[in-house]
Image (cartoon, coloured by chain):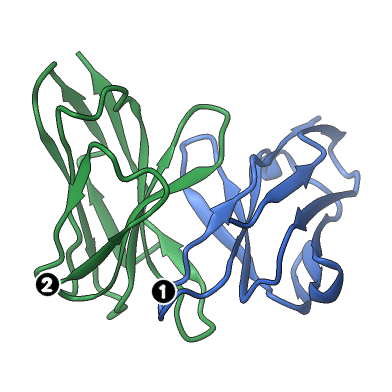
Amino acid sequence: GIQVEQSPPDLILQEGANSTLRCNFSDSVNNLQWFHQNPWGQLINLFYIPSGTKQNGRLSATTVATERYSLLYISSSQTTDSGVYFCAVADLSGTASKLTFGTGTRLQVTL
Amino acid sequence: DGGITQSPKYLFRKEGQNVTLSCEQNLNHDAMYWYRQDPGQGLRLIYYSQIVNDFQKGDIAEGYSVSREKKESFPLTVTSAQKNPTAFYLCASGGTGNQPQHFGDGTRLSIL
């Protein structure tokens, strides 16, 4: 199956700093999603980005499918950005998209 | 995400007991999924269903069972055969036709 590696595993930032999270995957994918898991366990969709670049406020993401990696950029970080960021990928089997998750990047933003 | 309801939020299981976790969606999605998350880990796929009355095993199906009698509902039963059931269980739907998967808020299952 597809392997997903995320780096760094842990990250501590001061409020206002910028950061880049990386996701490498081992095979071609038809689906790539970035999620933020908050301290209560809720998994929040950030981006659906199997290729290309998208931006949403202070967050942006780029996937280079031919080189099998994706980057999540967080600018001007805030304490509410703390939590775990997951990258998940899938190749389509039938009509369902079975996601394989990385082990996440745990982000702590301090004052 | 809105539109997917999981219940209960917390569940306790006694030894030898089966328990059922509920997942309901009103997003009109054909596909639904169950994932398990252990502390400090990513999610792993237990079962998925592409359409009513059809479902397939994921990567860690042993000790679990599901049914898909209605499009809106995909309950997960954790059987007594699952020897390490303590985990956070997340239900999702969607993920077809170049659309993302959406997740419910999860159920935390613990052993008494």
* Residue labelled with disc 1: A96
- Horizontal placement of B64 versus B101: left or right? left
Chain that bears disc 2: B
Q: Position of residue A12 (x, y in %)?
A: 82, 30
Q: Which residue is mark 2?
A: B70
User: Looking at the picture, which amino acid does disc 2 mark?
Assistant: Lys
Give the image location of residue A76, x and y in percent. Answer: 86, 51
Q: Which chain is green?
A: B
Task: Locate residue A62, reporting x and y percent.
Answer: 82, 70
- Separation of residues labelled 2 and 1 (CA atoms): 17 Å
Question: Is disc 2 in contact with disc 1, using a CB cutoff of under 8 Å?
Answer: no
Left or right: A9 in relation to B19: right
Q: Nearer the viewer, residue A70 or A26?
A: A26
Image colour for chain A is blue
In the displayed structure, A77 sits above or below B87; it is below
Residue at the (18%, 48%) spot, across then down: B65
For the residue carrying disc 1, how many other residues have a C-alpha within 10 Å: few (<14), some (14-19), or many (20+)?
many
Front-most of residues A79 and B49 = B49
Quarter occupied by residue B60? top left
> Do tags 2 and 1 sit on the same chain?
no
**Type of amino acid under label 1:** Ala
